[in-house]
Image (tube, rainbow, N blue to C red):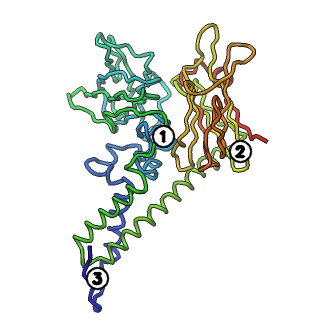
């Protein structure tokens, strides 16, 4: 497509700079998938996690990179692979939820205060093993200040305060449907969630076509072609806007990277390959700690790093936790493709016989030997590793199952 040359006496209008900035933002919104989030929704209502929710509340699907990496980091960094979450806006309670139990390893429904602040008193979370099912195999849950005469119930506390409802489903069975429940207020109005229905993918990360560099380039070409057709007299301005979009994205990537490094290395002050950040004790969370996270910083730039932990533990014939997983992350909050949980980890029994342990090697030169747990960190040899422990029986489990990280000399 050839555009007419501008006359030599052409002078840019006074609004050229403003128009360039506006076009740069439009380009950036399309380039980064942000436009997909903005269209058809009120940002705060539909994606409340954009406004400062803690990192463990993510609105990312089982394949986190189906959204652009910058947007993913803004919504909720460090999502677990194959982790499906849904979030409501601030809701006036009481409400009644009706839904189908997802096919997964763990799922729960929890109520939060504004900003994702956890409520540490009362019954604020109901998990799968605590949920009584109806005769048809579905569940009904009431969230209200007063306990109903029967059925599942979450204490909403002060009825005058709006709350936020979060639904988690970890390790969904591949290919199965995941559907958020219907939520109805006492006045009959229906409450919408940020995610309503998805298909669970495999545990391995795969770059979605909507987020790859080729797709982003295609979006930019389409967007700029449309702008050039609409404003042929502002060809230079449109081109400047496109360049500005690329620069804006690179700037935000650096800001996100700096923020995450500051959070993990500055605030937590974790020493790479040595320190382990422990999860909060159950008592400090009002007994609602149904899953716990151990966080470590790995540095494999000079050699391999080994993460060791407890794969299984039985005491008096009872499992002391449901399952565990090991995931590595870039500092911009996205998970690396390799991923392990207790179904894929190769372990070894301890002499006592009641525990089974595992070793995961973080390496830049994977050997791909059968039976060896390896995560290829060659693209990101310096990052974050998170070990999740779901349904720990008590605080003793957190101490006994504390993972170790060490540098292989």
**Label 3 – label 1 distance at C-alpha:** 48 Å
Looking at the image, which residue sits at the far top?
316
- N-terminal label among 3 and 2: 3
Q: Position of residue 313 (x, y in %)?
A: 64, 17
**Label 3 – label 2 distance at C-alpha:** 55 Å
Q: Is residue 168 left or right of residue 341?
A: left
Residue located at (31% from left, 33% from top): 197
Residue assigned mark 2: 271
Q: Quarter of the image for the C terminus: give it.
A: top right
Q: Position of residue 196 (x, y in %)?
A: 31, 34
236 or 349: nearer the eye? Answer: 349
Q: Is residue 145 left or right of residue 5?
A: right
Q: Is residue 405 left or right of residue 93?
A: right
368 or 377: nearer the eye? Answer: 368
247 above or below 3? Answer: above
Residue assigned mark 1: 205
Is label 2 in a helix, a strand or a loop? loop
Is label 3 in a helix, a strand or a loop? loop
Q: Position of residue 252 (x, y in %)?
A: 48, 59
Is label 1 in a helix, a strand or a loop? loop
User: Which of pointers 3 and 1 indicates the residue nearer the eye?
Assistant: 1
27 above or below 155? Answer: below
Q: Position of residue 282 (x, y in %)?
A: 57, 24
> Crowding at label 3, few (<14), some or many (≥20) Cα neighbours within 10 Å?
few
Mark 1 vs 2: CB contact within 8 A: no
Residue assigned mark 3: 13
* Rendered image quadrant of residue 323: top right
- N-terminal label among 1 and 2: 1
Residue located at (61% from left, 33% from top): 294
């Amino acid at each position: 497509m050839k555009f007419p040359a501008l006359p030599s006496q052409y002078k840019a209008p006074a609004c050229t700079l403003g128009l360039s900035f506006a076009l740069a933002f439009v380009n950036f919104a399309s380039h980064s998938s942000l436009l997909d989030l903005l269209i058809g929704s009120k940002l705060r209502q539909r994606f409340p996690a954009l406004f400062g929710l803690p990192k463990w509340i993510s609105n990312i699907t089982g394949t986190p990179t189906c959204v652009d990496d910058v947007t993913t980091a803004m919504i909720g960094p460090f999502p677990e692979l194959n982790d499906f979450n849904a979030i409501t806006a601030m809701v006036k309670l009481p409400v009644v939820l009706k839904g189908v139990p997802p096919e997964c390893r763990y799922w729960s429904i929890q109520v939060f205060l504004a900003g994702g602040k956890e409520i540490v008193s009362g019954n604020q979370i109901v998990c799968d093993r605590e949920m009584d099912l109806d005769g048809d195999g579905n569940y009904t849950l009431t969230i209200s200040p007063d306990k109903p005469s029967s059925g599942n119930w979450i204490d909403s506390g002060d009825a005058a305060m709006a709350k936020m409802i979060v639904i988690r489903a970890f390790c969904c069975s591949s290919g199965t449907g995941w559907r958020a429940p219907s939520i109805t207020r006492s006045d009959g109005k229906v409450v919408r969630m940020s995610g309503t229905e998805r298909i669970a993918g495999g545990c391995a990360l795969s770059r979605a076509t909507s987020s790859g560099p080729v797709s982003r380039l295609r979006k930019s070409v389409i967007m700029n072609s449309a702008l050039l057709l609409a404003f042929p007299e502002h060809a230079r301005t449109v081109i400047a806007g496109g360049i500005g979009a690329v620069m804006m994205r690179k700037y935000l990537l650096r800001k996100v990277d700096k923020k995450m490094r500051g959070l993990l290395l500055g605030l937590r002050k974790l020493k790479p390959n040595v320190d382990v950040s422990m999860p909060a004790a159950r008592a400090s969370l009002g007994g609602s700690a149904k899953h716990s996270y151990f966080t470590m910083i790995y540095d494999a730039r000079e050699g391999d790093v080994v993460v060791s932990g407890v794969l299984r533990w039985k005491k008096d014939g009872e499992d002391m936790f449901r399952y565990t997983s090991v995931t590595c992350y870039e500092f911009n909050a996205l998970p690396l493709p390799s991923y392990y949980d207790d179904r894929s980890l190769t372990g070894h029994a301890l002499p006592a016989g009641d525990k089974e342990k595992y070793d995961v090697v973080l390496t830049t030169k994977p050997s791909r030997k059968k039976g060896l747990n390896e995560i290829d960190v060659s693209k990101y040899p310096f990052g974050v590793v998170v070990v999740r422990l779901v349904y720990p029986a008590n605080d003793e489990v957190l101490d006994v199952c504390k993972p170790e990280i060490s540098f292989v000399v």
